[in-house]
Amino acid sequence: MDILRFATAGSVDDGKSTLIGRLLFDSKAIFEDQLEAVERTSRDRGTEYTDLSLLTDGLRAEREQGITIDVAYRYFATPKRKFIIADTPGHIQYTRNMVTGASTADLAIILIDARKGVLEQSRRHAFLTTLLRVPHLVLAVNKMDLVDYSEERFEEIREEFTQFASKLNASDLTFIPISALHGDNVVSRSESMPWYQGPSLLHHLEHVHIASDRNLVDVRFPVQYVIRPHKTEFHDYRGYAGQVAGGVLKPGDDVMHLPSGLTTKIASIDTFDGPVSEAFPPMSVTLRLEDHIDISRGDMICRPNNQPQVAQEIDAMICWMADTTKLSPRAKLTIKHTTRTARALVKDLHYRLDVNTLHRDETATSLSLNEIGRVSLRITQPLFVDDYARNRQTGGFILIDEATNGTVGAGMIL
Amino acid sequence: MLQHDYTTSQLDVLEAEAIHIMREVAAEFERPCLLFSGGKDSIVMLRIAEKAFWPAPIPFPLMHVDTGHNFPEVIDYRDRRSAELGARLVVASVQDSIDAGRVVEETGRRASRNRLQTTTLLDAIEEHEFDAVFGGARRDEEKARAKERVFSFRDDFGQWDPKNQRPELWNLYNAKIRKGEHIRVFPLSNWTELDVWDYIRREGIEIPSIYFAHTRRVFERDGMLLPDADVVQRGDDEPLFESMVRYRTVGDMTCTGAVSSSAATVDEIIAEIAATRITERGATRADDRASEAAMEDRKKEGYF
């Protein structure tokens, strides 16, 4: 059994909570005491139906205001897969949350109300999903029961969205007509839509192929921690611990250390459970090398003939996440990229992107909360980077405010 | 050409993620510690720590907040397991906090030291200058926890501000704090109760005996089975009876209920949990039943 991480985008009006509630309920991930609590609260508030959004809205402020503030993580499993849902609020002010949820997602579900069709919000969600390079996108056209399960309406929406998506570089795109309320095409195929020949949503989630989404070509091993036991038994042991960010490593492979550029071979790939014959993402392992090279946290191990860029000047798309401060040229920030932390100077803001129209505003002088733009950064130390499109681990970084220590930006290297 | 499709099982993915988190903490903080209660989640967390740094020893101490109301079997397990690993165990005692006048013992039949633990915990974090504290909490446990970060920031009063959390992207964790502040780290955030049991089975890890079915003298209160023990105050209208029970969670004897069960092996426990329709906290924790936001409120004050 493997894990599929998916993000859901849409507002309560699109039936997102109902959809999640149904997936959880039908897979028995909602327990009786949780349901009772939700039913009790719904009754107390005089709501006619059981408000399943109460299951995901975990904070007092959310329940009081009837809004979702933050990404909520939910879990369920079927005999085929374990699922982690990053449930992100749909409102415009919460781009930050959507970006956060999408950063680790294998798949994103965007909900569209069949009556309303493709809205500005749907475009924004699709754009953010592709910006974050979520490999699989599902357009769930919901409330099909309210448009008489019309194939024509579904095709209209599919057509409109496909046209928009072609501008986005969207990857694997799947359209599924559903009714979350009645369960049509959620867990099992709907009898009300005989014209739809595709899988149900759950079937798609269970079977979508994600193993090849990882980069298994470019060997990237950011050194996270140096293991030196100082024990008699392992007196000379020196291991480089980390999580494989790309490629497949094997004992005997020629490898190169960055920043030194020195080459050696992998002597052994160690784990607590014994040495392994290969390591690939997302394994956490410890490498021992044949030659003694001075290696510390933040360094990179790669293949001599396939290296990341060694860069002190990078261009990136930034999503700004700070409530009070803005990103503008000359700003100095801390940057964390793989296991390396350095300082960054914002050299230039090239444009601010309107996430609804994709219009580039080149006159922009700053980015505020939830705004996205292209910037150039100068870094105090070289980073070992790949294009985000090629590797999400070695292409993504965060920016930290040096005064507040808050995480204020997410960056994707171009 | 790739020889196979490099699929990774769910337990391997979760383990790799947790190991990565532990190594980040060891690399970025001066004085981490790991909260070890002898409960199943902290047992799994300790095994992950063992794996993350092997063949080196775990590079931080363990800490237990001892309420004095713990099950003796669990305290016994705690001491044995820490000794086996050669780990340093810091015991922060709620009784000491009471004796020092830092907290006042609750009175009455429902008296519990659950809430008092927060003060003891925060005092110990301050005394030992811990800047990162590993906890075994999981997001599937409770809805306030569903919104918590893996690296969860605590201000210099130990408080959690759920509305002002740092965004957490990819596997990049922000470890920046000022002196006096700390980070609670939850390496098992993405694990479910079933994952924890599957992992215990796979790893063949020993667990305290009270997790398995045994005969115990109990009484019923609010639909929960509480044990017959000196520290638990029982009324005349709460008669004792013998029952075959086990514990699904391990907390204080005063507020942790047993469940009726005949599960005598890890396999049987897994079968039981897979079939259950009640959450572990709903079934066994009086402390969470206080209100809709009981956990959120305690967490804001600095609870585990």
Image (tube, coloured by chain):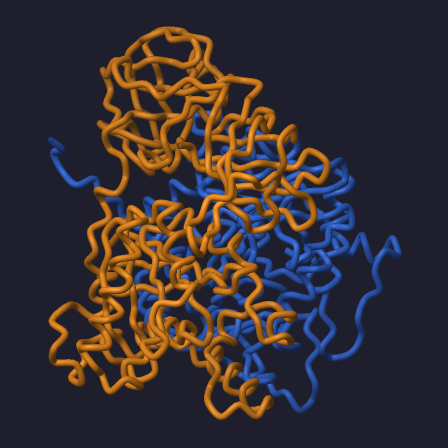
Chain colours: A orange, B blue
Q: Which percent across, then down, holds residue A308?
A: 35, 21
Q: Residue A268 sits in which quadrant?
A: top left
Instruction: Tell me what residue is drawn at x 71 percent, y 40 percent.
Output: A404
Q: Which percent across, then down, holds residue A379?
A: 55, 22
Residue B76 visible, this orientation = no
Give left or right: position of A346 versus B198: right
- Residues B215 and B145: in front is B145
Q: Which percent across, then down, holds residue B287?
A: 64, 71
Task: Tell how many labels.
Answer: 0
Question: Quadrant location of the C terminus of chain B?
Answer: bottom right
Give left or right: position of B74 versus B140: right
Instruction: Tell me what residue is drawn at x 24 percent, y 87 percent.
Output: A148
Instruction: Tell me what residue is drawn at x 42 percent, y 57 percent.
Output: A124
Placement of A210 over or under A177, stated as above or below: above
Seen as rendered, the residue at the extreme right is B101
- Residues B206 and A176: in front is A176
- Residues A224 and A245: in front is A245
Q: Which percent across, then down, holds residue A10?
A: 42, 67
Give left or right: position of A363 versus A401: left
Give left or right: position of B201 versus B296: left
Placement of A22 over or under B105, stated as above or below: below
Question: Quadrant location of the N terminus of chain B?
Answer: top left
Instruction: Tell me what residue is drawn at x 32 percent, y 8 percent.
Output: A263
Residue A9 visible, this orientation = yes
